[in-house]
Amino acid sequence: MKKVIIVEGKSDKRKVEKIVREPVDIICTNGTIGVSKLDELLEELMDKDVYILVDADKSGDKLRKQFKRELPEAEFLYIDRKYKEVAASPEHHLATLLLQANIEIEAKYLDIRMNGL
């Protein structure tokens, strides 16, 4: 099944793209998402494995709540609150989250994770 990762912004997308090895669609919400845009997105996400990876802040919490309501079958990935933003999270932290969600990551992040760096 095709995998989709939903992030907030383009910098989040670029960071995740560097880490992920398998083909996944990474969709940016560009912050909050309106009802009509959400409806379009939900249609696009049918029959896909969806992962929500948003910032650990007020707008991220709002998006997460919205997706939990409209797309409860999605898997929610949580960055450590100390990093606040996906784009500001260390690559090894994001790699660990993605790997735990059964998303293939680049080999160099496996090495970092195994060595505890």
Image (tube, rainbow, N blue to C red):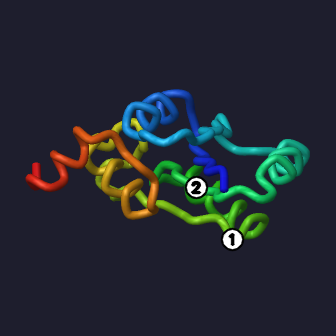
Q: Secondary structure at mark 2?
A: strand
Q: Secondary structure at mark 1?
A: loop
Pointer 1: what residue? 73
- Dots 1, 2 in contact, CB < 8 A: no
Name the residue nearer the viewer: 75 or 108: 108
Q: Residue at x 58, y 47 (%)?
A: 5
Q: Is residue 63 above or below residue 36?
A: below
Task: State the separation of the CA atoms marked 1 and 2.
Answer: 11 Å
Residue 52 rendering spot, x and y as whole percentages: 58, 55
Q: Which mark is residue 52?
A: 2
- Quarter where residue 18 is shown: top left
Relative placement, left or right, of 1 versus 16 is right
Residue 73, position in %: x, y? 69, 71
Q: Residues within 10 Å of mark 2 (few under 14, many from 20)?
A: many
Percent x, y of residue 72: 70, 71
Q: Where does the N terminus fall, quadrant-wise?
A: bottom right
Taking the spot 66% from the left edge, 50% from the top edge, the residue there is: 2
Q: Which mark is residue 64?
A: none
Is residue 34 shown left or right of residue 57?
A: right
What type is the residue that disc 2 sits on?
A: Ile
Of mark 1 and mark 2, the one earlier in the sequence is 2
- The three-letter amino acid code for the residue at tag 1 is Glu
Residue 59 higher or lower than 8, as above or below: below
State the residue in front, 112 or 10.
112
Q: Nearer the viewer, residue 64 or 43?
A: 43
Give the residue displayed 31% in from the left and 55% down from the top: 96
